[in-house]
Image: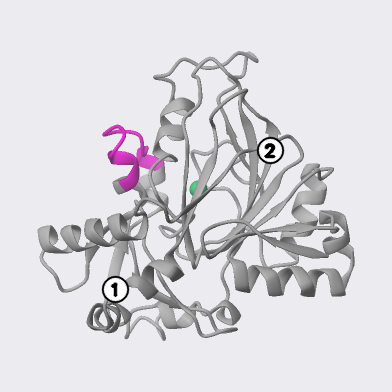
Amino acid sequence: MDIVPLGPGFGAELRGVTLSEVAGDDAAYAAVRAAFEQHSVLVFRGQEVSDDIQLAFSRRFGEPEFTKVGSLGTGTHFVRLTTIGPDGKVVPPDHRYALRNRANQLWHTDSSFKRVPALTSVLSARTVPGEGGETEFVSTRLAFERLAPAMQRRLENSFAWHDYAHSRGQIAADLASPEERAALPPVCWRMVWVNPVNGRKALYLASHAYAVEGMDEAAGKKLIDELMAAATAPGTSYVHQWKNGDVVMWDNRATMHRGRPWPADQARLMVRTTISASAADGLESMRPPGRQAAE
Ligand SMILES: [Fe+2]
């Protein structure tokens, strides 16, 4: 397996390894897992992808999430991100599918709004538009390292509230449905995630974050906005241009990402599997004090 660095200080393409090999071979998994811990974003090209192969690969990293209510694929292990309606045609720009894609274009980390956040997401390209539709990544590990030491210390002991309805509300007031709101109440996480393998610290932030514990609402929001802007400063991102057969996985503990727009009349279908974080991934120290025993 060859590791080819991709982005500004993070991200790598892995060559000479297939998803099926990782699913079936302990040594292949160990090599990919080590690259994942180090590089945060991994790109595999020219893969033969089916739902079964993607899920078998993903399961190596932990427990797969069940897709939440209100998403295409609910109750399965697959999220289908599409602009193709049930009639096989591309949906109009004001359709829920299209609005959800716009929400995806806000910087975020997947599943920070869930009771169990995500370790990694695995995304495969099934139908790629002729132009646009890239996925853009930043390293929140490098973003943390760019902060002044006093701010680093402060954030290590700060906690932010995350809410799915908040990020969706930035696109349309009712984009999060009553069922989604009921299923996904706000959750609170430490603002720095320490990787237990290498000790490196990363900002844990997302478009879902809306308040900081112990700060008044406006001041907390301002701090989140400033940190988001610093973490996504120009020149810090890796932009992945999708080709059929591409599979990209990322570390939700140490990155943020966003989808990029593409022409509204062009079809795009991506399939995501998402693996929940566990204690071995550093999850327990993310909980606010007092909740560690409770949950
Ligand atoms: Fe995402």
Left or right placement of residue 154 versus residue 130 in this view: left
At mark 2, the secondary structure is strand
The residue under label 1 is: 159
* Residue 83 spot, x, y in % from top left: 55, 24
Amino acid beneath label 2: Ala
Find residue 199 and report its horizontal and vertical position in percent. Answer: 51, 85
> Which disc number belongs to residue 17?
none
What is the CA distance from the residue labelled 2 to the residue labelled 1? 35 Å
Between 225 and 170, which is closer to the camera in this rendering?
225
Residue 2 horizontal/vertical position (percent): 80, 64
- Cβ(mark 1) to ligand 1 < 8 Å? no
Label 1 sits on what residue type? Answer: Phe
Q: Quadrant of residue 169?
A: top left
The relative height of residue 155 versus residue 266 in the rendered view (above or below) is below
Asked whether 174 falls inside the magenta stretch, the response is yes
Numbered badge on residue 125: 2
Quarter that holds the C terminus: bottom left
